[in-house]
């Protein structure tokens, strides 16, 4: 049974990693990113709740009556 020749594996793996690194760098350098993101001011709208439209009387709990 012939023995597997692994003498070229190191060069193959290293050259593949370098090629992938270069391709990844080229892909990233072609992207455009915003220079400085600006804050967007959002105005919140006040919503009317049903309990804000009418006056309600708040009663004390029964346990707090002083006699």
Image (tube, helix red, strand yellow):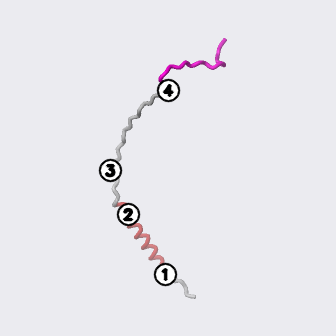
Percent position (x, y) of residue 60?
A: 60, 18
Name the N-terminal-most of marks 3 and 2: 2
Which stretch appears magenta?
50-67
Q: Quadrant of the N terminus?
A: bottom right
Name the residue tied to disc 3. Answer: 35
Q: Is residue 31 above or below residue 12?
A: above
Is label 1 in a helix, a strand or a loop? loop
Name the N-terminal-most of marks 4 and 1: 1
Q: How far is mark 4 from mark 1, CA to CA?
A: 81 Å
Q: Is residue 46 above or below residue 59?
A: below
What's the residue at 37%, 60% (across, down)?
28
Residue neighbourhood size for the residue with mark 1, other residues' Cα within 10 Å, grouped as few (<14), some (14–19), many (≥20): few
Q: Nearer the viewer, mark 4 or mark 1?
A: 4
Find residue 50 and name its label: 4
Magenta stretch encompasses residue 53: yes
Name the N-terminal-most of marks 2 and 1: 1
Name the N-terminal-most of marks 4 and 3: 3
Is label 3 in a helix, a strand or a loop? loop
Magenta stretch encompasses residue 52: yes
Is label 4 in a helix, a strand or a loop? helix
Name the N-terminal-most of marks 4 and 2: 2
Residue neighbourhood size for the residue with mark 3, other residues' Cα within 10 Å, grouped as few (<14), some (14–19), many (≥20): few
Is label 2 in a helix, a strand or a loop? helix
Residue 61, image quadrant: top right
Q: How far is mark 3 from mark 1, CA to CA?
A: 48 Å
Q: How far is mark 4 from mark 2, CA to CA?
A: 58 Å
Percent position (x, y) of residue 11?
A: 44, 76
Name the residue tied to disc 2. Answer: 25
How many discs appear? 4
Residue 32, image quadrant: bottom left
Outermost residue toward the top? Answer: 67
């Amino acid at each position: 049974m012939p023995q597997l020749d692994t003498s070229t594996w190191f060069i193959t793996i290293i050259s593949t990693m370098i090629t992938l690194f270069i391709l990844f760098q080229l892909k990233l350098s072609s992207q455009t990113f915003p220079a400085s993101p600006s804050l967007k001011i959002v105005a919140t709208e006040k919503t009317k709740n049903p309990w804000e439209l009418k006056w309600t009387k708040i009663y004390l709990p029964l346990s707090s009556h002083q006699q």
